[in-house]
Image (tube, helix red, strand yellow):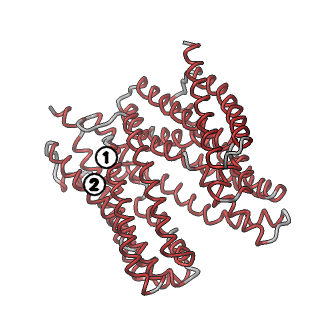
Amino acid sequence: MERKLTTMGKQSFLQGTLILSSAALVTRALGFISSIFLARMLGAEGIGLLMMAQPLIPLIITLTELGLPVAISKLVAEAEVRQDHAKTKRILVVSLIVTSTLSITLTLISLLCSKYIASILLADQRAYYAMVALTPIAPIIAVSAVLKGYFRGKQQMKTIAVSDIFENIANICTILLLVEWLLPYGVEYAAAGAMAASVVSEATSLTILSIRFRMERAKLPTTISISEALAKGKSTLFELLRIGLPTTGQGFIHSLYGAFQPLLVASSLSLAGLVTSAATAQFGLLTGYALPLLFLPGFVTHSLSTALIPAISEAHASRDNLLMHRTIEQAMRIALLVGAPSTIILFEWATPLATLIYQAPEAGQLIKILAPFFFLFYFEGPLHAILLGLGRASTAMWNFIISIICRTAAIFLLGSRLGIEGVALGIGMGVLVMTMLNFFSVSKAVGFYMELRPYVATGVCMPLMGICGQHAYAYLQGVGLTLLPSVLLSILLALACYFAAWMGMRVWRT
């Protein structure tokens, strides 16, 4: 009976990936709708104020979570294998105490020092109101992060998916109400209202998670009291920090690099002979147009990585090497299934897509340069998740640091000689180094056993898809179709060619 209670509602690795990917697709669509509403209601000035305060969110999340969600999902998954409900409760109690203390402290510091922080971080002091409106989000994120880590560890991805969807719905509704209500008082107050909508939406997500957690807890036998959990909390805290701190360190490094990258790119482009205004415009093409389009299909592999950490942790804890390698192989196949056709589409239709979506055909060349490198990007996330599931967070962090160093050097050297194309190549080199380091680390840790047939078939089908798509697009343009139907129809025909050839090769080799 106890085993039944523990596994109730638990999804398999593939089910969890599918649920999270579906939810990610919905939330991305809702986020896109939200951005349209904001752009129309606030205008360029209001969006600028909002964007000045927006970068504070990742920093708050990094400081508040302390990398614990990843650690919680891993340790809860391992405890579930051993039916150790006392360990699960200790993980929850210690995590809530740590994150709550950090978040409340951060909130008080932010409120007391808000004017001083705004004078340093904000170029336009009108964004101060948006920054203050964001302050209450820290304690909400803290508790949500712990509960999400718990449900990931239990492999109950449906709960997380539902909370994410309602979070985005609440965000849109609150934006419409607050921004319209506050806009007559000034654009700075409307921007603050939009930021306050983030707090309301996070609270909505937390409410759903809390209700589901209470239902989950009612099904399980009473194990230990909070005082008993705290009595053994020191060792649990050490376990959490051993995994969480490297993840936090990686987050800080990523944030620092994000702040440093514009200066790095501008410096390299100035050495290539570009004036400041031209360098800024080209940097906008790369970061505002090319990279978002390249990252777009990554929501599937992000969901895959989220589901992969507890799945690998559980298989590793139970010493089920067969299950672990089967899960790894499934993850790599999903990454291949998403990455291969996405790479061909982004490479072959780079300029038409940039023209259709952004009215910026000049971004097409940058997309074409980066697309082959981003084929590896679809594998990098799952490989990183496998390392975290194996408890090798420090290895993942050092791999990230090495890749950042290589990327920085490549951007500066290539950008100063080749301009923005060199910067794009430098970013691609960083993706290559990161993926290779993670691959070798996983291979060293547990070995890597892959069936070669899907990869060989994909290697043959990718150029076939490209050739088919290229001829279809040229034909459709030649018969007088406009850009939108030409792009959509040629992509659909190319995808049909790809999957037909792939399935045919599998049948032929069976």
Residue at the disc numbered 1: 151
- Residue drawn at (50%, 71%), measured in percent from left and top? 40
Q: Secondary structure at mark 1?
A: helix
Q: Which residue is mark 2?
A: 209
Q: Quadrant of the N terminus?
A: top left
Q: Nearer the viewer's eye, disc 1 or disc 2?
A: 2
Give left or right: position of 74 versus 343: left
Rendering coords of residue 261 (x, y %): 66, 62
> How far apart are the alpha carbons under marks 1 and 2?
9 Å
First reached walking from the N terminus: tag 1 or tag 2: 1
Res 107 label: none
Q: Is residue 426 visible?
A: no
Q: Residue at x 58, y 50 (%)?
A: 295
The residue under label 2 is which amino acid type? Answer: Leu
**SS for callout 2:** helix
How many C-alpha atoms fall within 10 Å of the one at disc 1: few (<14), some, or many (≥20)? many
Residue 357 x, y percent position in the rendering: 62, 55
Q: Position of residue 221 (x, y in %)?
A: 14, 42
> Would you place residue 494 above or below residue 130 in this image?
above
Residue 482 relative to residue 164: left or right: right
